[in-house]
Amino acid sequence: MNDTDFDIGAAMAGTLRGGRGDAWALVRGFAAYWGEPLTPEDGFTDADLDAAEQRLGLRLPVALREAYRLFGRRADLTSSQDVLLTPDELHLLDGALVYRAENQGCAHWGVLLDDLAQEDPPTVARPDLADKSQERWEPWEERFSTAAAVMAMSEKLLEDDEFGVFYEAGDEVPDGLVELPALGRDFRWFAGPDVLVLLIEESLMVARARTEDALDAL
């Protein structure tokens, strides 16, 4: 792809103000520009999702089905650190459908059962606490499609390969980068030529480069 083929800032802004179609356009463009283009084999089938519905005794939200069909099998976009559950791993917990888990089980993400009828429902998160009586589902992203797009982008940056950079605690955002739209809870994004940086909760920072020259400059 040429540098002009994917405007990540515009795609992120479109996701913030648009619908789930804009989120899926962001995922497609991002996957192709920062990794490999999506293919039909990168998603689960309708039969996989229908089987999950039958097992759970409920209907999955439209946006969740679309995300799983689009890129649910792409580990670099779903499971570099935390894990998108497969359709046969989806389960219920305290009034919510759980679809994602932190890599050591320290947190889960889900959709409240009361919201499943919405096409693109809000998401919730739940930390794993020593005192289980204190655990609660807390609001996360206002739309599942937004949560899924943020997952795809952040998991790609967290991929442990030769083009990823993990910064030390206290490091500052590299000079010369432009801040992108604020997509994702407690996330800040920055971009430069062939470089993307993610600052999480003002503490953890990771980056990805597309070329060796960009990596050296970073």
Image: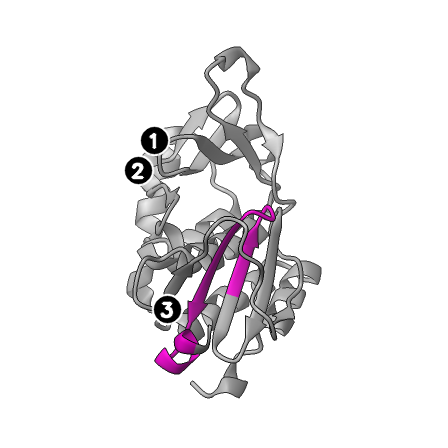
Distance from Cα at disc 2 to Cα at disc 1: 8 Å
Query: Is 172 rendered above or below residue 1?
Result: above
Residue drawn at x 30%, y 37% as measured from the top left? 88
Q: Quadrant of residue 52?
A: top left
Q: Which residues are magenta?
A: 197-216
Mark before the other along the chain sequence, 2 or 1: 1
- Residue shown at the point (61%, 75%) measured from the top left: 176
The question of residue 35 being in magenta is answered with no
The disc at residue 217 is: none
Q: Residues within 10 Å of mark 3 (few under 14, many from 20)?
A: some
Left/right of residue 137 with respect to residue 132 in the rendered view = right
Q: Nearer the viewer, residue 96 or 156?
A: 156
Give percent across and percent down for residue 162: 30, 67
- Determine whether 135 is above or below 37 in the image: above
| Of callouts 2 and 3, the N-terminal one | 3
Nearest to the eye among marks 2 and 1: give it. Answer: 2
- The image shows a total of numbered marks equal to 3
Location of mark 2 (residue):
88
